[in-house]
Image (spheres, rainbow, N blue to C red):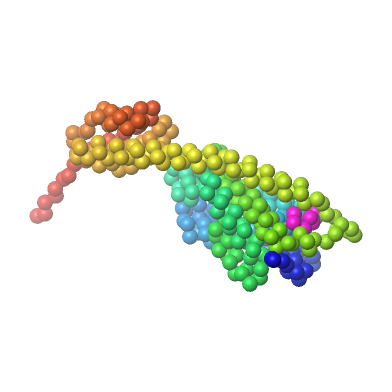
Amino acid sequence: MLSVSDVDIASMRDQVFFEGPEQSRRLSRFWLLLILSAVIASAGVVGDSTATVIGAMIVAPLMTPILGTMLAVVLADRANLLRSIFLVVTGAAAVIALAWLLGQLVPYPIVASTNAQVAARVSPRLVDLVAALATGAVGSVALARSDISDTLPGVAIAISLVPPLAVVGITLESGKPGQALGALLLFVTNVTAILASGIIVMFLYRVYARAPRPGGEVHYFRRSGAIFAIATLVLIVAIPLAITSTTVANTSVEESQVQSVADKWAKAAGWSIVTVSPNATGMLVRATGPLPEPSTNELRKALDAKGLKDKTIEVELVPGRVVELHGH
């Protein structure tokens, strides 16, 4: 049976709690790394650089107070629970504020339609929750077992914490509150998943059995209420994730159907389809080819025959011609 010793518990507390004689040094390190990771993540998002964003993930220290919150719930340690929650909330707010300020330096909006880093974080789906649950479990096992703690850098990369917050601040500054809300949902999803899967791992390791009994100067609480709150939060975040997943799936199916019909229509006229993408009204089809332009009425008929009668399609035709430049 999985279990931990008192020595293991002491080691776990030392890794994730901000207490004891080293408290000031740990807090200063946390805020220093958080500010630097926020700047790196914001720069990576603005520059649309995946490598830079990954660097911010590795530097970001937010995983520590999140795991601290989880461990405090299992140990029913009220003081460390409040301290860890405070660091998560204020740390998240600080990253958003810094990203917003850095967004002021960019003369153009950073939005999902023009930036892959933003687009990847504003429409979280159920699969993101599943991935976060698995990643949170790995992080918790690494916390409980020192022999696999070297996996933590990989956990930091797999679980995205600071980059979504940077996207929140940047998209707010760009006037896109809807996208900011989506990125915030991704962050909340990841935090909730870490707490939920972490608590399960800690119970499998019977960490709760090592929790000190009430008494003395330490204040404890009933962990059942906190666990219920976390479970409820998982269900709450799952609802919008499920809606987004369904919407994305439906859009992908319709996009594939429109692509198939448009390809046949364009090929018959000697044209080719450049892109098929969703837009504000339905789908946008971009096509290019030689004059004369193909009949869009024929495309509409073909779409209707495919069962897409209620779908609004915007067609962008780009006539092209070949010019032969002779040498001297």
**Residue 30 image point, x, y percent:** 68, 60
- Res 83 quadrant in image: bottom right
Q: As drawn, which residue projects farthest toward the right?
A: 216
Q: Residue at x 45, y 41 (%)?
A: 249
Q: Residue at x 48, y 38 (%)?
A: 247
Which quadrant does the N terminus fall into?
bottom right
Q: Is residue 74 magenta?
A: yes
Position in image of residue 267 (x %, y %): 22, 40
Q: Residue furthest left?
A: 328
Quarter of the image with the C terminus in it: bottom left
Q: Residue at x 66, y 44 (%)?
A: 233
Place of residue 169 in the rendered image (x, y in percent of width and height, measured from the top left): 58, 46
- In the image, which residues are magenta? 72-78
Does the stretch in magenta take in 66?
A: no
Q: Main secondary structure of the magenta part?
A: helix
Count of marks placed on residues: 0
